[in-house]
């Protein structure tokens, strides 16, 4: 999941509870706008199709990787 990779590598957040119950999907009805010239082709592809977008929710078990300990005790596992 791209969103989980971004959370870990960019935000340094480890979700620890990714499941179907914590992922919401919706249809995108807002047209995509290209930011750079290199994304013009991508803009055309997205404008001609209906893509799904999603949200990752329920961060109750999440850890801030730079602030929290790295070891997980057996009682914290789900």
Image (cartoon, grey):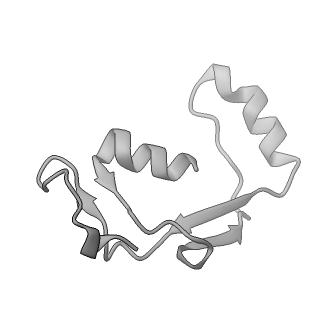
Q: Position of residue 13 (x, y in %)?
A: 30, 54
Residue 63 lies, with reference to residue 37, above or below; the image says below
**In this rendering, position of residue 29 left or right of residue 10:** right
Residue 68 lies, with reference to residue 56, above or below; the image says above
The answer to which image quadrant residue 25 occupies is: bottom right
Residue 37 lies, with reference to residue 19, above or below; the image says above
**In this rendering, position of residue 19 left or right of residue 63:** right
Q: Position of residue 59 (x, y in %)?
A: 35, 72
Foreground pick, 43 / 64: 64
The answer to which image quadrant residue 14 occupies is: bottom left
Q: Position of residue 76 (x, y in %)?
A: 27, 73
In percent of the image, x 13 and y 54: which residue is there?
Answer: 69
Foreground pick, 49 / 60: 60
Residue 62 lies, with reference to residue 67, above or below; the image says below
Q: Position of residue 4 (x, y in %)?
A: 47, 52
In percent of the image, x 58 and y 50: which residue is there?
Answer: 1
Residue farthest to the top, as pictured: 38
Residue farthest to the front, as pictured: 74
**In this rendering, position of residue 15 left or right of residue 43:** left
- Quadrant that contains the C terminus: bottom left
In percent of the image, x 15 and y 46: which residue is there?
Answer: 66
Foreground pick, 73 / 22: 73
């Amino acid at each position: 999941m791209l969103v989980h990779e971004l959370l870990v590598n960019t935000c340094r957040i480890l979700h620890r509870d990714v499941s179907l119950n914590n992922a919401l999907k919706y249809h995108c009805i807002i047209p995509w706008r290209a930011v750079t010239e290199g994304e013009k082709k991508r803009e055309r592809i997205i404008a001609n199709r209906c893509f799904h977008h999603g949200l990752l929710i329920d961060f109750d078990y999440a850890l801030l990787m730079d602030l929290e300990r790295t070891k997980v005790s057996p009682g914290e596992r789900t």
